[in-house]
Amino acid sequence: MRKSIINIIILAVCIINVVLCGILVFAIVPAMTSTNKMVTSICKLIDLELEGKELEENGDAIPIDKVVVHDIADEMTITLKNGSDSKTHYAIVKISIIMNSAHKDYATYSTVLPTQESLIKSKAIEIISNYTLEQAQGYTNVVEEDILKALQEMYKSDFIIGVNFRELTFS
């Protein structure tokens, strides 16, 4: 008699376990699915890339011997937008422009580029001055991307493949 009561208790506990697992699956899976959809849509909205970007041309990586770096010689002191502390802050910047020497427009613009450094500097000043100290410190790669896009629009070509800050100091 005792063995059959123990068997009935074990069977009841197993049935309760199966029912609770079923409830868990039906309660958690839909919530996880909707959360995954929400995160995916947010990533699409802010254009978040989960993998690093490569310098590419026609799907192939640009060989290092085709990359040319032009350093803007002058150091620029740029007034940043006032932030939450309402104080005036400055960014002291030296910029390098990275170009693809295999690009069809490189031959045209590479000879003109050194004579147009003042245009490049004014474009960089225009972009950097739109950021507060906190934004500029936290998102230097975004600032570099904004300058790159502005230069590509200015030259109406994508022979410039990158903009880097050689030196960047905030005060």
Image: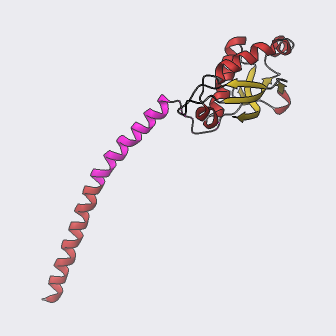
Name the quarter where the C terminus is drawn.
top right
The magenta-colored residue range is 25-52
Residue at 61%, 34% in the rendered image: 139
Judge whether residue 44 is colored magenta. Answer: yes
Q: Is residue 90 left or right of residue 40?
A: right
- Percent coordinates x, y for residue 62 in the rendering: 77, 29
Residue reaching furthest bottom? 1
126 is within the stretch colored magenta: no
Query: From the image, which quarter does the N terminus lie in?
Result: bottom left
Q: Is residue 93 above or below residue 32?
A: above
Q: Residue at x 61, y 37 (%)?
A: 138
Q: Quadrant of residue 112?
A: top right
Is 147 positioned to the left or the right of 84 in the image? right
Name the one closer to the observer, 90 or 19.
90
Residue 111 seen in the current view = yes
Residue 123 pos. (x, y %): 70, 16
